[in-house]
Image: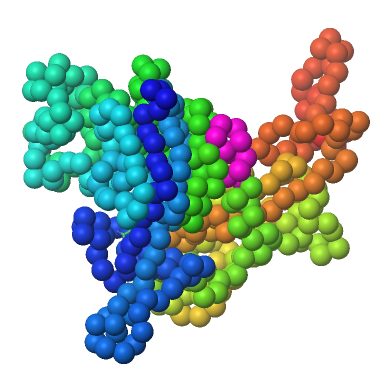
């Protein structure tokens, strides 16, 4: 009982769309409108009689969190996971007391430090140095206490040179470095970190994960939102899986990640994605219309690892654009990027490199080929995006479709277990006793095609 440091009971948060939340949070509004329009529990309030009720009718009520119950014990490192819009940030804002719940109760034991969106917590006009002291004061620390931590905070953040610059001049990367450093070093009993770390470089992210581990091993409690399941698996002992405002699963990290994978894969299309009302992807210049993965040879089995596949990307250009460059990411079932392939206009120009010139508004198609005997017996996701003028980034989709492969016997010999690895390329192998043949001969045999391929 005394070990419980966070207790959440029947927590709910309702937003009225069309109204700004009184705390001044604007960030989620556009998404809120989108989500509310498609939410299964959408509901218009009021009738259309009087002026007042007409106003009410124009507003939509939307529950960003519903009926959330959980407890967190001291020293737990909890991964808060779930798809975009699931309610993770809303939950963290309530726990950080940045916003009020509509119903329900939260109990917190101890000092809470949180790092939410880039832009919260710091005062833009104050310098880095002043913000460190300000945050310390907010956490209830004396000047002397902050002073004793000051050098460590600055060293960890790596922003020494800019300590006396107002933080509004910081890049988002610098901002996050300092904000994380402050939150983690001021010895909160509960440390709450939203996805902001995704802004920093991977070196710094690693440092942060290490720091969070230290904080936790000191018996303090960490709540950590991430889309990176590898980081969650490495850092967390517990998970809270949020889905559409509800708590879908609470428990150990392995079971939580499995539940997350199942949830994501049950909500993502297989083999083909196409846009439609509420599922648009793009911007005012380019819109993604459909992405289909199919065998190059229609007679072959698309789920066999030895089948060559094509990824057919249909898109619409909405303005005159030059150097339109489609690209795709292949990701694993945890969302980790395995590779990125770009239809580069700057590569050797061939006559069909029409993308080099201006594209008129209209429908276009790009096709990327994935060789056979290259992917492994597992599930992969695909994300698609576009650059223009060669390097100007337009957008990248979330994971919009999944493909999965079953085992194929041709590359396995007698072995029937799970084949390890992200990919499974078919490579040439030759071998011989070291004394009887030299390496160059092995190379020759490979060239002649005598190598075993497996
Ligand atoms: N201030 C707000 N006003 C209206 N809706 C909001 C507000 N903040 C968040 N939302 C909506 O609540 C839902 C949950 O958002 P959020 O907690 O940010 O999700 P997550 O962090 O899991 O992506 C989303 O649909 C979001 O658009
Ligand atoms: Mg969020």
> Of 196 and 97, which appears nearest the observer?
97
Q: Is residue 181 visible?
A: no
The residue at 32%/55% (across/down) is: 102
164 left or right, relative to 279: left
Residue 440 position (above or below residue 65): above
**Predominant SS along the magenta part:** helix
The quadrant in which the N terminus is found is: top left
The residue at 76%/54% (across/down) is: 308
- What span is colored magenta in the figure? 251-261
* The furthest residue to the bottom: 49
101 left or right, relative to 150: right
> Of 447 and 281, which appears nearest the observer?
281
> Dividing the image into four equal quarters, which quarter contains ligand 1?
bottom left
Give residue 192's position: percent from left, percent from top. 34, 35
Give residue 29's position: percent from left, percent from top. 32, 63
The residue at 36%/16% (across/down) is: 218
Is residue 316 a member of the stretch shown in magenta?
no
The quadrant in which the C terminus is found is: top right
Q: Is residue 454 visible?
A: yes
390 left or right, relative to 243: left
Give residue 67's position: percent from left, percent from top. 45, 51
Residue 120 position (above or below residue 7): below
Give residue 132's position: percent from left, percent from top. 15, 31
């Amino acid at each position: 009982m005394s070990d419980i440091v966070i207790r959440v009971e029947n927590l709910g948060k309702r937003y009225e769309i069309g109204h700004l939340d009184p705390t001044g949070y604007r960030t989620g509004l556009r998404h809120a409108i989108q989500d509310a329009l498609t939410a299964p529990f959408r509901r218009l309030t009021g009738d259309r009689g009087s002026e007042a009720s007409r106003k009410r009718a124009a507003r939509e009520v939307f529950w960003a969190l519903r009926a959330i119950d959980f407890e967190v014990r001291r020293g737990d490192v909890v991964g808060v996971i779930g798809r975009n819009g699931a309610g993770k940030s809303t939950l963290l804002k309530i726990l950080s007391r940045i916003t009020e719940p509509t119903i329900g109760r939260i109990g917190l034991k101890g000092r809470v430090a949180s790092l939410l969106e880039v832009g919260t917590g710091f005062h833009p006009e104050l310098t880095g140095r002043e913000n460190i002291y300000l945050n310390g004061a907010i956490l209830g620390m004396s000047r002397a206490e902050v002073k004793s931590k000051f050098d460590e905070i600055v060293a960890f953040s790596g922003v020494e040179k800019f300590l006396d610059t107002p933080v509004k001049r910081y890049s988002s990367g610098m901002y996050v470095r300092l904000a994380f450093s402050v939150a983690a070093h001021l010895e909160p009993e509960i440390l709450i970190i939203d996805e902001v770390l995704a802004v920093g470089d991977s070196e710094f992210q690693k440092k942060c994960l290490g720091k969070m581990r230290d904080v936790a091993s000191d018996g303090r409690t960490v709540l950590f939102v991430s889309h990176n399941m590898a980081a969650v698996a490495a850092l967390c002992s517990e998970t809270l899986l949020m889905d559409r405002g509800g708590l879908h699963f609470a428990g150990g990290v392995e079971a939580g990640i499995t539940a997350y994978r199942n949830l994501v894969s049950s909500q993502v299309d297989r083999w083909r994605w196409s846009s439609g009302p509420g599922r648009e992807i793009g911007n005012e210049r380019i819109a993604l219309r459909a992405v289909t993965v199919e065998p190059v040879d229609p007679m072959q089995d698309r789920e066999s690892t030895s089948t060559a596949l094509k990824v057919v990307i249909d898109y619409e250009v909405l303005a005159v654009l030059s150097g339109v460059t489609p690209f795709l990411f292949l990701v694993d079932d945890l969302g980790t990027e395995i590779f990125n392939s770009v239809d580069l206009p700057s590569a050797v120009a061939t006559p069909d490199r029409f993308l080099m010139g201006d594209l008129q508004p209209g429908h276009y198609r790009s096709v990327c080929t994935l060789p056979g005997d290259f992917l492994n017996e597992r599930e992969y996701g695909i994300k698609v995006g576009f650059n223009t003028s060669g390097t100007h980034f337009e957008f990248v989709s979330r994971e919009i479709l999944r493909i999965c492969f079953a085992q194929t016997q041709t590359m396995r010999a007698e072995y029937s277990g799970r084949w390890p690895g992200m990919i499974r390329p078919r490579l040439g192998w030759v071998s011989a006793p070291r004394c009887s043949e030299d390496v160059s001969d092995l190379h020759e045999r490979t060239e002649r095609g005598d190598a075993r391929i497996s």
